């Protein structure tokens, strides 16, 4: 059976299929974890420890030796994405109740859902799209997007807008595994390769654990709001990303549009933040379902829209690497072995 190939045909399938299976388990056998106990219960309820290992491994994949052009491109997209998510959160907080919207077609929508769906780009989707429609420098620009992974950026945005207050120790606790992985990965390329191989295999595990916190009835209710949220993510983040790519990063806008997605890993952030801030806990199931739907919607539409954009404006030319002063032979020898 070609199960993996079938899952890969589904946008974000590596995350969404296990999440749906977990939701089925929770809906039809909510006490299965307690009944079986031991390792089975660990797989069902182990969202936080599984995510901690994944976050550590993600940090190890970031290479400080990336070229200046790649860092310029990825830095521009990263800062723009975070800034837009912060502004969207600030505006949404003025109109959405603290406990989220309870009734109507937008029932379940909350500031938590908006923040976590907008502040994190699907790096794998971006890289795949840019490999097909962009330059090699643009494809490599996902190098800094891993910084968005995990709850840190969401915590920063919610704290900066005054919606939530996080103690300094919580910020440290959220980022410490990432920083340790980042440090080890840059000290030893073999460790980067070792831990980097764990990033994708861990996704189905935390997807399944996340799904075990969701009732299928919640997913059914999130259909229209989730669809609208996904479209909003593309529009609200896409336009500024296109402009910053064209006028700051020197591209043609395609890389910006390709970055206007919701990451599959973002589905985990409402639950993690809910563990830190108890008042967010009642919103977590609906927010998780909304972010999962937004992930699916953006994963389908972003490649299509990027292809249409490239057909209209043409491919971007490879970006020139900034000139660096030549080194004398001895200095060059030392530089090569640094």
Image: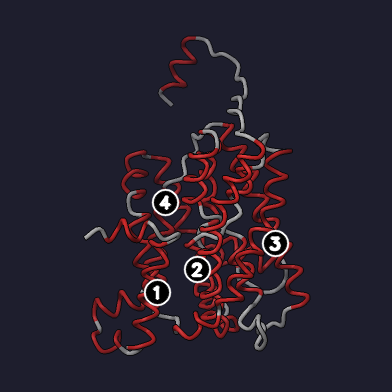
Cα–Cα span, label 1 and label 3:
29 Å
Query: Which numbered mark, 2 or 1, is in the foreground of this view?
Result: 1
- Residue 292 location (% of width, % of height): 50, 69
Kindly state the secondary structure of the residue where label 4 is placed. Answer: helix
Task: Say which element carries label 3.
Answer: helix
- Residue wearing tag 3: 86
- Please tell me how crowded label 1 is: few (under 14), some (14-19), or many (20+) other residues with Cα within 10 Å: many
Within the image, what quadrant is residue 154 found in? bottom right
Label 2: few (<14), some or many (≥20) within 10 Å? many
Q: Nearer the viewer, residue 140 or 63?
A: 140
Q: How far apart in space, not on screen, are marks 4 and 3 (Cα)?
A: 26 Å
- Which residue corresponds to mark 1? 20
Cα distance in 3D space between marks 2 and 1:
12 Å
Q: Find disc 2 in the rendering and name its residue.
A: 267
Tell me which label, 3 or 2, sits earlier in the chain: 3
Q: In the visual, does 113 lie left or right of 214?
A: right
Q: Residue 222, image x and y in percent?
A: 55, 78
Q: Quadrant of residue 85?
A: bottom right
Residues at marks 1 and 4, CA–CA distance in whole angstroms: 30 Å
Which residue extends farthest left? 1
Q: Quadrant of residue 247?
A: top right
Which residue in the protein does label 4 denote?
181
Q: Earlier in the sequence, mark 2 or mark 1?
A: 1
């Amino acid at each position: 059976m070609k199960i993996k190939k079938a899952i890969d045909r589904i946008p974000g399938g590596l995350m969404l299929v296990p999440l749906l299976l977990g939701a089925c388990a929770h809906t039809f056998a909510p006490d299965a974890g307690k009944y079986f106990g031991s390792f089975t219960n660990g797989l069902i309820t182990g969202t936080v420890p599984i995510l901690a290992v994944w976050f550590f491994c993600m940090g190890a994949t970031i290479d400080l030796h990336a070229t200046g052009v790649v860092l310029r491109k990825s830095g521009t997209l990263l800062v723009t994405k975070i800034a837009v998510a912060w502004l969207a959160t600030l505006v949404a907080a003025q109109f959405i109740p603290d406990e989220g919207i309870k009734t109507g077609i937008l029932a379940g929508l909350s500031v938590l859902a908006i923040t976590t769906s907008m502040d994190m780009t699907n790096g794998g989707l971006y890289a795949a799209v840019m490999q097909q429609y962009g330059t090699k420098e643009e494809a490599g620009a996902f190098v800094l997007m891993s910084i968005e992974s995990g709850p840190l950026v969401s915590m920063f945005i919610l704290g900066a807008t005054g919606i939530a207050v996080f103690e300094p120790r919580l910020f440290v606790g959220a980022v410490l595994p990432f920083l340790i992985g980042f440090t080890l990965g840059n000290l030893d390329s073999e460790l980067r390769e070792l831990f980097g191989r764990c990033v994708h295999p861990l996704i189905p595990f935390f997807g399944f654990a996340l799904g075990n916190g969701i009732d299928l009835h919640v997913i059914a209710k999130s259909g229209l709001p989730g669809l609208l949220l996904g479209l909003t993510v593309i529009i609200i983040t896409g336009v500024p990303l296109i402009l910053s790519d064209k006028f700051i990063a020197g591209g043609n806008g395609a890389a910006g549009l390709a970055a206007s997605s919701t990451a599959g890993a973002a589905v985990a952030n409402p639950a993690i933040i809910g563990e830190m801030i108890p008042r967010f806990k009642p919103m977590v199931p609906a927010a998780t379902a909304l972010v999962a739907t937004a992930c699916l919607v953006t994963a389908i539409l972003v490649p299509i829209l990027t292809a249409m954009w490239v057909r209209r404006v043409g491919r971007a030319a490879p970006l020139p690497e900034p000139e660096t002063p030549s080194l004398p032979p001895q200095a060059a020898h030392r530089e090569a072995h640094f």
